[in-house]
Image (cartoon, rainbow, N blue to C red):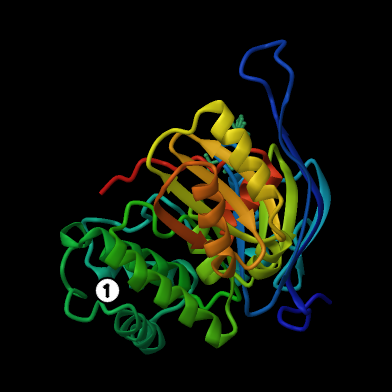
Amino acid sequence: MAGGGESVWAIDAHELVKSYRGRRRGDPPIRAVRGVSLSVPAGTIFGLLGPNGAGKSTTVRMLATLSRPDSGSATVAGHDLLRSPWNVRRAIGIVSQKSGADLDASGRENLLLQGRLYGLGGAPLARRADELLARFDLVGAADRLARTYSGGMLRRLDVAIGLVQRPAVLFLDEPTTGLDPHARAVMWDEIEALTADGLTILLTTHYLEEADRLATQVAIIDSGQVVVEGTPDALKSELRGDAVDVDLDAEPTAAQAEDLRARLTALPGVVEVVFDGWAVRTRVDEGAAKLPAIFAAVDGAGLSVVAATVARPSLDDVYLRHAGHRLGRREEVA
Ligand SMILES: Nc1ncnc2c1ncn2[C@@H]1O[C@H](COP(=O)(O)OP(=O)(O)OP(=O)(O)O)[C@@H](O)[C@H]1O
């Protein structure tokens, strides 16, 4: 018997495939997910990243039993997705991007309603609701209609609703889209704290910094396939060197650019030089230590430095390298 909890993997998916019918008759099928495999250790946060249409939602919908894979297999919380979908359903919580809260009910009522859907009731459910209201800092607003909540409060209520039945695995779809920076930081702390109780979270996000901050492991998905997977640090350390950007006092002429490129590439540790208008962007091993030599090269080419920055490669750079383009971000809706 497949019991929840004993498996090392909270989610173990192999070669999931899903196509949709084309929009019109005769259109080829849309291959939304083309062989996605994921292994998520219990008690960790796994970040699924990718642009619009990459196949993230389809992957999550399959793992959450909301859509049947064309082929492939998976276990979620130790239960086989295809053979025991009801067991999977009982072991998971889903927080979609669109709020699932009833705006005409209070926060507390929303939690009680969700609990009843899962067959809970009486004093244990009332206690669970109180516990979640306290955990998500909603005690003061517990008996107010959800429609009076701020965006951050509503998102916290959404997560609380997803947790009423104590799931082993929580699917969190873009939990901070549309939140202001303060509300986002609060939400990040809340999400991080959830894993302390052993909860496993599959987080889909457009924010690379969100995945970097929260996820133990990330997978970048593009055109229905995982293009790269690893810990944020391992992925970033694959990119050699620091990003050293130097703003110049003028756009270099072709001769100056050529001269500067030669001077820079002659320096030990410089692995890339790109001219970009009035700036020169370089990737340099131990970038901070090389700044004086870089400044001297700029001087030598007859140019002056206006400003310079040294940064470690970000998950953004990793994404660019593997997906071949920057991750498009959605407009923020406050
Ligand atoms: N029900 C559907 N019928 C037809 N095509 C669909 C359906 N759902 C998704 N698709 C298509 O499948 C592909 C993958 O979509 P999916 O929603 O999984 O991507 P996503 O990475 O979640 O994108 P987003 O970030 O926009 O939610 C897209 O080309 C999309 O248009």
Residue extending furthest top?
26
Of residues 81 and 334, the one nearer the viewer is: 334
Question: Residue 276's spot in the image, x, y percent?
Answer: 51, 36
Question: Residue 115's spot in the image, x, y percent?
Answer: 42, 72
84 is higher (above) or lower (below) than 302 = below
Residue at 37%, 70% in the rendered image:
187
Q: Whereabouts is ligand 1, in terms of quadrant?
A: top right
In this view of the protein, can residue 66 be seen by the observer? no
Label 1 secondary element: helix
Question: Residue 234's spot in the image, x, y percent?
Answer: 71, 68
Question: Residue 231's spot in the image, x, y percent?
Answer: 68, 68
Look at mark 1 in the image and give the residue it sits on. 108
- Horizontal arrangement in the rendering, residue 194 relative to residue 198 (left or right): left
Residue at 56%, 27% in the rendered image:
254
42 is higher (above) or lower (below) than 324 = below
- Give the quadrant of residue 175: bottom left
- Give the quadrant of residue 260: top right
Residue at 19%, 57% in the rendered image:
147
Q: Which quarter of the figure is the N terminus placed in?
A: bottom right
In this view of the protein, can residue 78 be seen by the observer? yes
User: Of the residues shown, which amino acid type is indicated by label 1?
Assistant: Arg
